[in-house]
Each structure stands twice: as C-alpha cells, then as structure tokens.
Image (cartoon, rainbow, N blue to C red):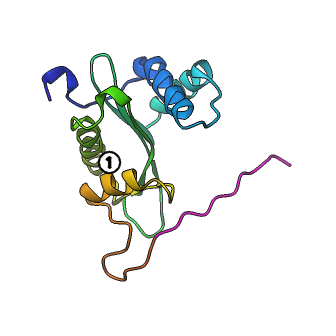
C-alpha cells in the first residue's frame, strides 16, 4: 500500500465522497439508499460529533469504515460499532479494507472505547472470513456461543 492509500480519520469535508461510496455499496447489494445527497447531509452531521468517526483510504477515497461509539453500563469508555465498511470492487484484495479496519479499531481505542463490535449478515461468508482474519470470531472463544443482533425498525407514534 502506498502513502496516498494510507488510512486516515475522515473530516466532514469527506462526507460527499463517502456518501457516493455508501450509495454505491447499497446499489451493489440491491439495498435501498436515500441517495448520495441525503447521505452526505447525514455524514456531515455525524462526522461533526464526537461519538462518530470514519476512517478512509485512497486518493480519491476508495475504502471507508464508519464507526459510532455508544455508552454502555458494562464497558468503560463505551462500545464502538462498525456501522459501515466498504471498499470499491476494483480495490478489494489489496489490503486496503484490512488497513481501514485496523485503523478504525486503533482510533476507537484511542478515543477510549472498551470494545469494538461488527454486525455481519449470516450468509455473508466472505465478510465472516475477513473479520475473523482481523480478530473478530463468529463464536465467542470462551463459550463457543454464536453472537446475534436482533433488530426492529421503529416508527414515531
């Protein structure tokens, strides 16, 4: 990986480019997207908060990891959640995504987070392997239990 590809912490000025990538990510997997403009507005707001950061790599940006840190009663410093991780298809298998993930974990620790979580869809075995290579096993090493995330969409009353 050369210097322009080196991961760095994103700024709100990166929001538009990140929005284009996240929109492409959803389109690649047939998922709905509110579109780059709405995503850019959201990212600009999120990246201005201390609870959210992103790591980007490439010039232009071709890989990103978006992380939110939330407070938690059991974990000092809170829990970092990798909200989004994407590398453009032409840049995959070059170590860029791994470098972004490694930098995201390091930045979360630097910000005081005590744990780092990643949600992965069950059928996405490539992602399972990728994250396992970077220290995130599918099963709890102590108990052998699989981890699950249960989710329900909410609507305002």
In the foreground, 47 or 130 = 130
Give the residues in magenta. Answer: 147-157
Q: Residue at x 19, y 20 (%)?
A: 4
Q: Is residue 54 magenta?
A: no
Q: Residue at x 25, y 35 (%)?
A: 96
Vertical side of 71 occupied by 138: above or below? below
Mark 1 crowd level (few <14, some 14–19, many ≥20, 10 Å Cα): many
Q: Which residue is mark 1?
A: 108
User: In which image quadrant can residue 23 be found?
Assistant: top right
Q: Residue at x 45, y 73 (%)?
A: 146
Image quadrant in which the N terminus is located: top left
* Location of residue 142 in the rendering, given as x and y in whole percent from the top left corner: 31, 81
Q: Is residue 58 left or right of residue 76?
A: left
Vertical side of 12 occupied by 52: above or below? below
Q: Residue furthest bottom?
A: 143
Q: Is residue 153 magenta?
A: yes
Vertical side of 6 occupied by 16: above or below? above
């Amino acid at each position: 990986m050369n210097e322009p590809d080196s991961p760095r912490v994103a700024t709100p000025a990166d929001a538009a480019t990140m929005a284009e990538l996240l929109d492409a990510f959803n389109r690649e997997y047939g998922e709905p997207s509110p579109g780059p403009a709405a995503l850019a507005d959201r990212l600009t707001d999120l990246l201005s908060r201390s609870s959210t950061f992103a790591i980007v790599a490439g010039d232009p940006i071709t890989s990103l990891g978006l992380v939110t840190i939330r407070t938690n009663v059991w974990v000092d410093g809170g829990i970092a959640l990798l909200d989004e991780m994407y590398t453009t298809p032409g840049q995959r298998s070059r170590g860029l995504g791994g470098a972004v993930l490694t930098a995201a974990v390091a930045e979360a620790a630097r910000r005081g987070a005590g744990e780092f979580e990643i949600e992965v869809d069950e059928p996405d075995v490539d992602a399972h392997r990728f994250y396992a290579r970077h220290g995130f096993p599918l099963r709890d090493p102590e108990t052998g239990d699989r981890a699950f995330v249960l989710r329900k969409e909410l609507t305002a009353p």
